[in-house]
Amino acid sequence: MQTKVLTFQSIHHVLKAEKLLLKAGFKLDIIPTPKNISSDCGMSIRTNCEDAEIKVIREILEENEFVFTINEII
């Protein structure tokens, strides 16, 4: 499992994405965007997922026309 941080353009997008991903059954947290990750928004979504789950997350967000970045935290 890898920790991923999803960044968005605004807190509105973070909250909307959180709602969609929780509804789809993903476990996640809203966190302050880490300083080493560039983002237009000060809040991000953190999740611990396998690669197959990240693929599903990406598909859900793209289907809903989100602009986002997935960052791996080591």
Image: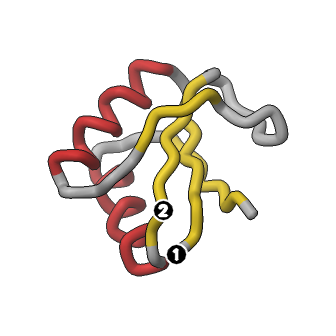
Is there a contact, CB below 8 Å, between mark 2 and mark 1? yes
Q: Secondary structure at mark 2?
A: strand
* Picture quadrant where residue 38 is located: top right
Nearer the N terminus, badge 2 or badge 1? 1
Which residue is at the front of the view, 26 or 61?
A: 26
Percent x, y of residue 34: 73, 36
Label annotation for residue 1 = 1
Q: Residue at x 39, y 47 (%)?
A: 28
| Residue shown at 54% from the left, 46% from the top | 6
Residue 64 in the image: x percent, y percent?
29, 45
Q: Which residue is mark 2?
A: 48
**Residue 43 drawn at (x, y percent):** 56, 26
- Amino acid carrying label 1: it is Met
Q: Which mark is residue 41?
A: none
Q: Secondary structure at mark 1?
A: loop
Give how far apart the Cα atoms at labels 2 and 1 are.
Answer: 6 Å
Q: Residue furthest left?
A: 23
